[in-house]
Amino acid sequence: MIVAEKPVDFKTLEEEIFRLVCGWGCELLKQAFEWYDTQLMLSRDRRKYRHKGSRATSIKTVMGTVPYKRGVYIRKNEDGTKNSVYLLDEAMGIEGIGQMSGLLSEMVAQAACEGPYRSASRSVSEMTGQTISHTAAWGVVQKLGERVDTQEAQAAVAAAENGGSGTLETPVLFEEQDGIWLKLQGKDRQTHGSSKEMKVGIAYDGAEKVGKKRYRLTNKVACANFESSEKFKKRKEGVIAGTYNTDEINIRLLNGDGAEWIKPDPDDESVYFQLDQFHRNQAITKWVKDEEKRKLLVKLLYEKRIDSLLGCIEGYINCLDDTVETEAAEKENLEKLYTYFSNNKDGLIPCHRRGLHIPPPPDGKEYRRMGCMESNIFTIIGNRMKGHRTLWSIKGGNNLARLLCLKHTGKLTDTLETLSSVCLPLEYVEEIVVKMTAAKAPKYDGKGYEPVHGGAFPALPEFKWLRDIGRTGGFII
């Protein structure tokens, strides 16, 4: 088989060999599927399944689209009814036509978590033998996101009933939550406004040192969604219970910006809430313009004199005159600060300064001060979904956010492996013997003509064989 009639450089040769190998791989998969279908036909219950010929279908893989045929059968049900079935599809867990392999789906999902769908489709198409459009990449994310949603919903139910399936034990669990506002599109924009807050939560059992001044959260789990606060709390508990044995958790430390949906259940005495120190200090800087007043409030705050702090703010408010324009604006800001601090009075003192009896951390871990949510909310959601003129639907944003949470907690690959539906039994694969020549490989692939890229070969003597390739009229495999 002549690969090229003109001199080729190494890049062109590499691309040509990659194309041929992908073609052979597709042929191997085709023969494996059809051989397996034949085994199912021979071993079926002939009284129950009547063979009615073969039908064509295909599956998208990293090597390319694999077309193959499988038998269709008329099945007699116990109630006397009949319906058409594909035994191969049932055995492999395939639903519908034009399926995508688990490995290709994972590659698309990983790429979609890194950048826009168009960039994801382009990178996957360039790195595999399969051409993926941006709409196909979007569709993969939606399908996988919906399956992850089903898993999280089931975990939430299990957590509410029996505590979940998590096995990791820790006496102390750190939780941090915050929201991020994302732009909406289409009908969701008409219903909810130009933007909507996505709730994000993480949980971890400590931190480990990975550098001189760098730490990494250990056993981190995360979830994100546009849903209501009650539904989000159930989802969050399901995600936590899917990893941790909640019966062994004695203390929960919760860090948040004071939003109502973040507040813990007042009846749960094991949860200690603290107002995020960044938001707490930012409120003083934002709403108190007088430097002397600001210093006094900070002093009372760090001396843990919370009642005196609130009383001082109230005194400042009473001393201002509403009829004076400048004082009216200052009074309004101080009233906002007073309301914010009074609503979060129990969380103004950080947990590490309350004298709580917290068990010592296990070897290799440290219990550090909370306050990493701002970094995590950007890393998990903001870096991919906020800015860049991106607009989201509620459903599409939720589906991508679920994959982003799994990716940034190191669980995306394992989760997608469990969601992959195509399964070919190993005992059948091992018995397949394929005799195939290069003539069975496709003559061309992709969008058509690919130009020959010129380049200079190394002039060293040991690379003479490589220079000789360029001098031949064609390269024969």
Image (cartoon, rainbow, N blue to C red):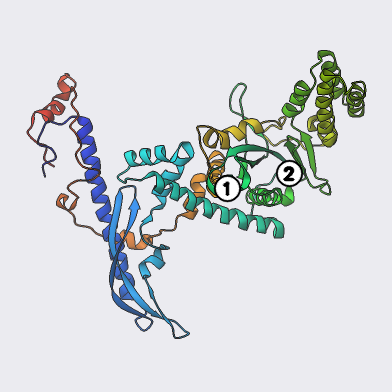
Residue at image coords 76%, 26% = 283
Q: Residues within 10 Å of mark 1 (few under 14, many from 20)?
A: some
Of helix, strand and loop, which one carries label 2?
Answer: helix
The location of residue 274, given as percent across then percent down, is: 78, 35
| Residue depth check, mark 1 versus mark 2: number of the one nearer the observer | 1
Residue drawn where x is 28% and y is 70% of the image: 54
Q: Whole-percent x and y of residue 102?
A: 42, 52
Amino acid of disc 1 = Asp
Q: Is residue 195 left or right of residue 325?
A: left
Q: CA distance from mark 1 to mark 2?
A: 22 Å
Which of the two discs, 1 and 2, labels the residue nearer the N terminus? Answer: 1
For residue 329, side relative to residue 11 (left or right): right
Number of the label disc, if any, that sits on residue 261: 2
Displayed quadrant of residue 41: bottom left
Nearest to the observer: residue 447 or residue 443 = 447
Q: Is residue 449 visible?
A: yes
Looking at the image, which is closer to me, 206 or 120? 120
Q: In terms of secondary structure, where does tag 1 sit?
A: helix
Please provide percent x and percent y for residue 187. Answer: 55, 49
Give the quadrant of the C terminus. Answer: top left
**Label 2 near label 1: C-beta < 8 Å?**
no
Other residues around mark 2 within 10 Å, as few (<14) / some (14–19) / many (≥20):
some
Q: Residue furthest front?
A: 323
Residue 121, above or below 430: above
- Image point 66% across, 55% down: which residue? 156
Out of 339 and 300, give the one closest to the viewer.
339
What residue is shown with label 1? 188
